[in-house]
Amino acid sequence: MYHMWTQAIEDAVAKTLKNIDRFGPKFPHVSRNGTYELNDNDDWTDGFWSGMLWLCYEYSGDDRFRQAAEATVASFRKRLEDHVVLDHHDIGFLYSLSAKAQWIVLKDESARQLTLQAADVLMKRWREPGGYIQAWGRKDDAKEAGRIIIDCLLNLPLLYWASEQTGDPVYRDAAAAQAEKSRRYLVRGDDSSYHTFFFNPETGEPIGGATHQGYSNGSTWTRGQAWGIYGFALSYRYTQNPRFLETSKRLARYFLEHLPEDHVAYWDFNAPVKADTYRDSSASAIAAAGLLELISHLDARDPDRSYFQDMLIKSMTSLVQRYATIGEENAEGLLKHGSYHVNGGISPDDYMIWGDYYYLEALMRLEKGISGYWHERK
Ligand code: GLY
């Protein structure tokens, strides 16, 4: 495997270097006809580019990556100061992979302070009496006030980390309560998951599950399931609550047992499979990174460990051999065949910058033990 992972990383690092000039001060989101759509740091996805630059810097030591990564963090500082499109829960994705990464890699105190400010912005989304983090929209948005989504689990490490750093338990308590709420209401009895769940914002009473990007309200959107694998494993890391570890394992088993022959997920586990059914390679990249986190918490006697390890290698091998753009010198993206929002008709078969990020994170962890920026390094 050594050669395959190294070759994939080298290819990714070379493409990322080229993309620094291509993207300039802008941020990639998803592609159209093979070209990334760029924005001015006003989308939920903009931390992933920053995270890729930090990973490439850690791998190569090449200062061009550090300079580009630091420029993204300066942009994130301005974004926070001006509160540009921050009325959503994805503050964790944005600031964990940018400012927190700068703190982890360079021990830069100003980056640490910026990350703590971001955690305070995320805390503003805590809602009583329901006791949850509102995913989207403003507090007075009648439609959105009661919504949680499974993706939020990856925003929680920012809060856990803020408690570690400050000694103030308020962030960690909110994160652990959100993880528990997600476990109870988003994860179903057969280990599949809802994408999103609604509560009555006035009373906190549960209403029911629904989807936003999945096939149907009761279906299992594969990327949501992948967010759950990784997110619950991270909540276990920070809380040591065994229920979160068990939930990550349950979601992982379901995900892996429902994969098609080539070990890369279709976009929804309930979407009818035909010759033209879209994949979501980004779901498999997230699941791979999540499996690496999950496996790191399982001891050698755990009965699931070797199954997860085996399936992780099969999925990563398929991503590298069948989905990656290795050898396509002018390709902007690393992973083909991601899908953003199939039913919404938005980039159903394209590059997704988060797919590229998690693919690279998984490769770096497999090959170099570099584990991304969701937690402090030991
Ligand atoms: N967090 C949004 C998505 O996965 O599309």
Image (tube, helix red, strand yellow):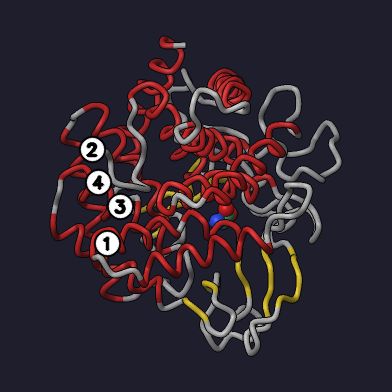
Residue assigned mark 2: 65
In front: mark 3 or mark 1? 1
Q: How far apart are marks 3 and 2 (CA)?
A: 13 Å
Give the quadrant of residue 287: top right
Dot placed on the residue nearer the N-terminal end, 4 or 1? 4
Picture quarter with ligand 1: bottom right
Q: In this view, does 67 lie above or below 151?
A: above
Q: Residues within 10 Å of mark 1 (few under 14, many from 20)?
A: many
Name the element at disc 3: loop
Residue assigned mark 3: 98
Residue toward you, 233 or 114: 233
Q: Where's residue 87, x and y in %? A: 45, 75
- Residue 115 is labelled as 1
Amino acid marked by disc 4: Ala
Q: Where's residue 298, x and y in %? A: 50, 32
Q: In this view, does 126 lie above or below 39?
A: below
Whether residue 334 is visible here, answered yes or no, is no
Q: How crowded is mark 2: few (under 14 residues within 10 Å), some or many (20 or more)?
A: many
Give the quadrant of residue 82: bottom left
Dot placed on the residue nearer the N-terminal end, 4 or 3? 4
Q: Distance between the residues labelled 4 and 2?
A: 6 Å
- Residue 69 is labelled as 4
Q: How far apart are marks 4 and 1 (CA)?
A: 15 Å
Tell me whether the residue at label 4 lies in contact with that at label 3, contact meaning CB atoms closer than 8 angstroms.
Answer: yes
In front: mark 3 or mark 2? 3
In front: mark 4 or mark 3? 3
Name the element at disc 4: helix
Dot placed on the residue nearer the N-terminal end, 3 or 1? 3
Tell me whether the residue at label 4 lies in contact with that at label 1, contact meaning CB atoms closer than 8 angstroms.
Answer: no
Tell me whether the residue at label 4 lies in contact with that at label 2, contact meaning CB atoms closer than 8 angstroms.
Answer: yes
